[in-house]
Image (spheres, rainbow, N blue to C red):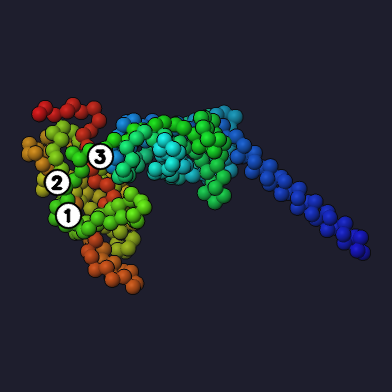
Amino acid sequence: MRERKGLMWGSSIFFVLFFITIGCSEKEKENAQAFITPDITLSDTELPIGSPLEMSYQWMIEDQMPPLKKDYTVFVHFLDQEGKLVFTDDHTPPLPTSQWKPGEQVEYERTPFIPYSPIVEELKVKVGLYHIESGTRLTLVGKDEGKDRAYLVGKVKLLPEDLRSLPVYKDGWYDLEVTSEDTFEEWIWSQKAAEVSFVNPRRDAILYLHAYSPADELGVPQQITLYLNDQPLESWQFTSSGDFLRKITIKKEELGADNWIDIKIEVDKVFIPVEHIEESEDTRELGVKVYNLLLKPAPGTPAARK
């Protein structure tokens, strides 16, 4: 009986090891070589810190590529000359990788903002795909300098910030906040109505508003309205919380002839933390949480005469 039990135990171990081996082989097979070539197109290769960076992603999937069984996350690393990570644009692609098909090309656009930092130099842009649970990176087709499955797809040179595109905060704002002294992430909350002024670029321009709406915390939709020189510019509604980016093109004629233009952000409902969050003592009336607010000349428009 003991010999039979030992035989059964040995057989069980064999089958367990067999299936583990098969499982590892399948995992290694998927991670060994994914026939996908990553590429990006940048709006510009030289940009001031704080600027929006328009990025067009392209993922070329070769015909012999077997379908991916998992959904992978895109990592996008901006690295300094010493290889130190400066900032990222990690994200989930709009079309999950498990739905990518052989012979197709997956394309989409994103607009990260270059964080405010003392770094003014050329950065390398490297991308790749990784599984968020295991951290495993796929081997792709491209230039893998560090043999770490991070593929060089471009470079961008950081310049000193462009003060002409920054807002002058006027009435209706709370103090600037940051996550910690070790990071460059910062934001400012508006009140029910808040005003800023910009230098008039005197040509077609784009207003960038990267912010957060506390609609979930409110429990009801929040309406946001923008005004340009006291005239309605754009209005929209949020039914759930989340970060958003609005890019609003403004014609030269709409900007007027004055040296400065005024933008007002107004919400129909404010979020008061002490009324919605247990143990909160924050009595502020919060409108939207603004990360980036810029007015930049539209691409391709001629500079105004001085």
Labels in figure, total: 3
Query: How far is the residue under mark 3 from the one under mark 1?
Result: 24 Å
Can you tell which of label 2 and label 1 is closer to the viewer? 2
Residue wearing tag 1: 194
Q: Looking at the image, is 125 positioned above or below residue 213?
A: above
Q: Is residue 136 left or right of residue 152?
A: right
Going by the numbered disc 2, the residue's amino acid type is Ser
Q: Residue at x 43, y 41 (%)?
A: 84
| Lower sequence index among marks 3 and 1 | 3
Which type of secondary structure does the marked residue at label 1 adopt? strand
Instruction: Tell me the kind of residue under disc 3.
Output: Glu
Q: Is residue 107 left or right of residue 197?
A: right
User: How busy is the neighbourhood of tag 3: few (under 14 within 10 Å), some, or many (20 plus)?
Assistant: some
Image quadrant holding the N terminus, namely: bottom right
Residue 197 shows which numbered tag?
Answer: 2
Q: Secondary structure at mark 2?
A: strand
Q: Residues within 10 Å of mark 2 (few under 14, many from 20)?
A: some
Answer whether residue 29 is visible to the viewer in this image: yes
Left or right: where does residue 45 sit relative to residue 60? left
Q: Amino acid at mark 1?
A: Ala
Who is closer to the viewer here, 33 or 64?
A: 33
Image quarter where the C terminus lies is top left
Q: Position of residue 131 (x, y in %)?
A: 54, 46
**From mark 2 to mark 1, how far is it between C-alphas?**
11 Å
Can the viewer see residue 288 in this picture? no
